[in-house]
Amino acid sequence: MLEEITPGTLLVETGTIRNMTITIRDLTTDGADDLQAFRAHFERHRLESGNSDIHFMPFDPAGSDRPGGLDELTLAYPLHEPRWQRWFVAVDAQQVVGHVNLRGDGLRVGLHRAELGIGIERAWRGRGLGRRLMQTALDFALRSAVIDWVDLKVFAHNQTAIALYLDMGFVQVGYRKDRFRIAGVRIDDVEMEYPVGGA
Ligand SMILES: CC(C)(COP(=O)(O)OP(=O)(O)OC[C@H]1O[C@@H](n2cnc3c(N)ncnc32)[C@H](O)[C@@H]1OP(=O)(O)O)[C@@H](O)C(=O)NCCC(=O)NCCS
């Protein structure tokens, strides 16, 4: 089971994705450089939401709130510990340009489900990285032998992301109208789930 694998040895993979040499690896608290590069990436990505792009994160860029992001302590939690997190990053020439993350449920009785989040910086989108990172997270879930369902939430106007999720086998299980109001704009939220190994 994955839980027995030392964090940091889980996944380091370098390959060519549409002519880019990209390394995908899991983020660990041991890798200070990776963590610093990740934080810089997450901040660049956060600033894109609602500025140079559609809103894709549930916060008002003009306000003081910030999206949750990485909780470093939880990287070392085993998968039977509530609120565990695993983050996988895509690195191009030492720069983190994308991430995907899974979070365990906050309740012990919900730990057969994990929630997925993903983000690719704008300049690296549309080149296969999103699909590749999604597959990394789904492979992790499959190999875990613990996670039976991967859940996600996505703004209804984010058609690019929804098309990718549907194509990867996610199904829509919920739709909440007027879930967020960002700068006065009403945003509907779509809930999707993926049955790991057919669940
Ligand atoms: C959604 C997102 C993760 C997709 O990642 P990506 O690297 O751009 O996607 P990929 O290049 O792997 O493309 C995957 C598929 O999406 C579709 N797609 C990608 N860009 C597209 C575009 N601009 N228009 C329409 N479809 C597009 C294609 O169908 C593609 O399929 P293919 O592999 O058969 O070509 C990325 O666009 C992103 O980070 N967006 C901003 C943050 C965000 O929305 N996060 C999700 C919040 S829930």
Image (cartoon, grey):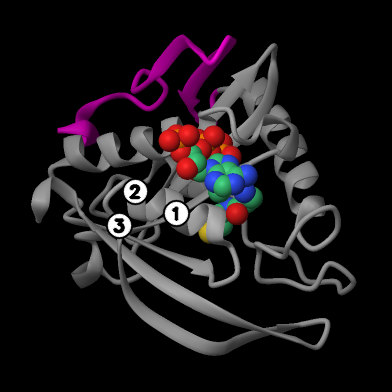
Asked whether 39 or 171 is in front, the reply is 171
The image quadrant where one finds the C terminus is bottom left
Asked whether 67 or 72 is in front, the reply is 67
Q: Is mark 2 within 8 Å of ligand 1?
A: yes
Q: Secondary structure at mark 2?
A: helix
Which quarter of the figure has residue 175?
bottom left
Q: What amino acid is at disc 1?
A: Ala
> Residue, x 42% and y 22% (percent of image)?
8
Q: Could you tell me if the residues under marks 2 and 1 are in contact, i.e. CB atoms within 8 Å?
A: yes
> Residue, x 40% and y 40% (percent of image)?
134
Query: Which residue is disc 3 drawn over?
Result: 170
Dot placed on the residue nearer the N-terminal end, 3 or 1: 1
Rendered image: mark on residue 163: 1
Q: What amino acid is at disc 3?
A: Phe
> Residue, x 51% and y 29% (percent of image)?
128
Q: Is mark 1 within 8 Å of ligand 1?
A: yes
Q: Is residue 181 left or right of residue 15?
A: right
- Residue 106 within the segment the image draws in magenta: no
**Distance Cα–Cα, label 2 vs label 1:** 6 Å
> Residue, x 62% and y 61% (percent of image)?
68
Query: Which residue is disc 2 drawn over?
Result: 167
